């Protein structure tokens, strides 16, 4: 789908620049986008930076990503059929991931830093009666062990300080996502979580700058709503030139 959109835009004359944006500037008659290689001048800007998955922030996490550490159970779960695995998180995604993995993994640990899950009760009750599911509450993952692949994790109980080693072949991290809007914080208004504030027309607090998709404040974040945002932002940007 994304490839089809890319090819269609390219056929219509869109120029793609695969460069990292460093900052943007707002001037009375134009906007300037500074990247790692160039600067671009425009009458309007549409920000569609999306979100990135929140990481644990512990040693060797990046090193073992793709080698037992994953952020997508539905993508990578089947690689661990018949194995012992762990899920870290307490929201809907974490609980749904754990329930999904119990269908084909030998044992599933779900690790959450609080004493109750934040997920909807309708999702939590699906874990009841799962004989191969182990709940590890009030705990956090503090260490990842393994040479070329993950072979165990260390989990520390927040109340007792006791650390336990869990022998698992995979750790699925599901502790939320964060927006990537930090570089815009000095020019447009963000909410307390770092999402861009817009109106229903995808207009930000600065005239001529729009935001579309998961990067903006919204209730539903799905492919269809992001595509809708893109169309709204693009039409408004063109109409207001």
Image: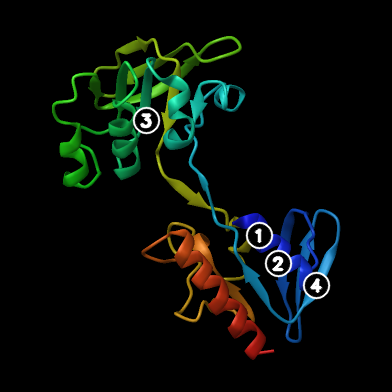
Q: Earlier in the sequence, mark 4 or mark 3?
A: 4
Q: Which mark is residue 88?
A: 3
Q: Which disc number belongs to residue 8?
A: 2
Gap between marks 1 and 4, in whole Å?
15 Å
SS at mark 4 in the image: loop
Q: CA distance from mark 4 to mark 2?
A: 9 Å
Residue located at (46% from left, 18% from top): 143
Across and down, in percent, residue 201 comes to: 49, 81
Of 127 and 64, nearer the camera is: 127
Could you tell me if the residues under marks 2 and 1 are in contact, i.e. CB atoms within 8 Å? yes
* Front-lying residue, 115 or 53: 53
Residue at the disc numbered 4:
13
State whether residue 230 appears in this view. yes
153 above or below 140? Answer: above
In the rendered view of the protein, which quadrant contains the C terminus? bottom right
Per the image, the residue denoted by label 1 is: 4
């Amino acid at each position: 789908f994304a490839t089809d959109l890319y090819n269609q835009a390219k056929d219509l004359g869109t120029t793609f620049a695969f460069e990292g944006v460093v900052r943007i500037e707002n001037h009375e008659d134009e906007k300037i986008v500074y990247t790692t290689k160039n600067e671009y001048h425009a009458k309007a800007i549409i920000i569609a930076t999306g979100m990135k998955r929140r990481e644990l922030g512990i040693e060797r996490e990046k090193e073992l990503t793709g080698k037992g550490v994953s952020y997508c159970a539905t993508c990578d779960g089947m690689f661990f059929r018949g194995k012992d695995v762990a899920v870290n998180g307490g929201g809907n995604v974490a609980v749904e991931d754990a329930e999904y993995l119990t269908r084909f993994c030998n044992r599933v640990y779900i690790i959450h830093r609080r004493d109750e899950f934040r997920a909807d009760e309708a999702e939590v009750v699906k874990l009841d009666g799962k004989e191969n599911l182990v709940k590890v509450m009030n705990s956090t993952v503090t260490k990842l062990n393994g040479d070329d692949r993950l072979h165990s994790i260390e989990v520390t109980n927040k109340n007792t300080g006791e650390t336990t080693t869990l022998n698992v072949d995979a750790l699925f991290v599901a502790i939320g996502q964060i927006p990537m809007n930090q570089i815009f914080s000095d020019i447009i208004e963000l909410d307390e979580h770092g999402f861009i504030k817009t109106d229903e027309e995808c207009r930000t607090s600065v005239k001529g700058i729009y935001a579309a998709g998961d990067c903006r404040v919204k209730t539903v974040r799905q492919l269809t709503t992001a595509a809708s945002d893109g169309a709204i932002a693009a039409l408004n940007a063109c109409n207001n030139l």
